[in-house]
Amino acid sequence: GNSVTQMEGPVTLSEEAFLTINCTYTATGYPSLFWYVQYPGEGLQLLLKATKADDKGSNKGFEATYRKETTSFHLEKGSVQVSDSAVYFCALSGNTGANSKLTFGKGITLSVRP
Amino acid sequence: DTGVSQDPRHKITKRGQNVTFRCDPISEHNRLYWYRQTLGQGPEFLTYFQNEAQLEKSRLLSDRFSAERPKGSFSTLEIQRTEQGDSAMYLCASSLSGTSGYEQYFGPGTRLTVT
């Protein structure tokens, strides 16, 4: 079945540091890939997505590239801010209606200190 | 606010009681999903509907769990004879079939505590 593996956390960075959060996946076919973010006290929000190999999703300074050859979808940001402190989840879904449910990784907590 | 809403936001119940949660999806979305999230874990799929039809149920969904979406709009998730292991955040999400990547939009969740 489908699965998503995220790097172990938590991660603590200083403001303006470079961020990489690793995500690899196992899936049949050609899944869509997502990063969701959960800010303290809030619900899950879609951060970015990519629907086919070599696509790059981007939003709010975050980027992730769909790498089929390495089955990865690593999240990067060049300069993090305190407001980026949150829990980040990598997820995938199938590309057919019958397989549209999301499979999530365990999530990683990012803390950014001033 | 046209996002996904859930009610109640918090529920505390005694073991053995029944509880029911409600989810109102984004109005034009025809797909509705339920997930469960425990502390330190990512959400896990429970079930989903396309319009009023329940198309898939996870093996996580024991016989004590039932979900409905009678008119293809709001949905309810009922847990009968609650157990302490049912304590979790229950998340609802909706999406529009046919959209690229089937991106799902989540509600704030209902946190269930079984004492």
Image: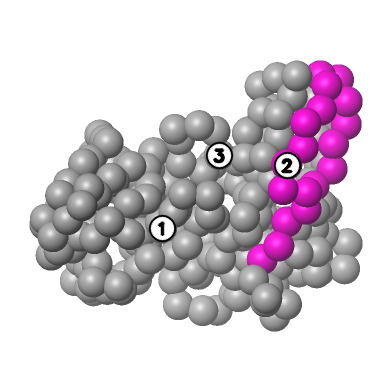
Residue A47 percent coordinates (x, y): 38, 66
What type is the residue that disc 2 sits on?
A: His
Residue drawn at x 33%, y 42% as measured from the top left: A109
Residue B6 percent coordinates (x, y): 73, 56
Viewer-closest of B64 and A19: A19
Q: Which residues are magenta?
A: B4-21
Q: Can you identify the residue that label 1 sits on?
A: A36
Residue drawn at x 11%, y 55% as measured from the top left: A17
Q: Which mark is residue B37?
A: 3
Viewer-closest of A37 and A73: A37
In what quadrant of the picture does the N terminus of chain A appear? top left
Q: Residues within 10 Å of mark 2 (few under 14, many from 20)?
A: some
What type is the residue that disc 1 sits on?
A: Tyr
Residue A96 visible in this rendered orientation of the protein: no
Q: Can you identify the residue that label 2 sits on?
A: B10
- Distance (Cα) linking label 1 and label 2: 23 Å
Up/down of B16 relative to B18, above or below: above
Residue A83 visible in this rendered orientation of the protein: yes
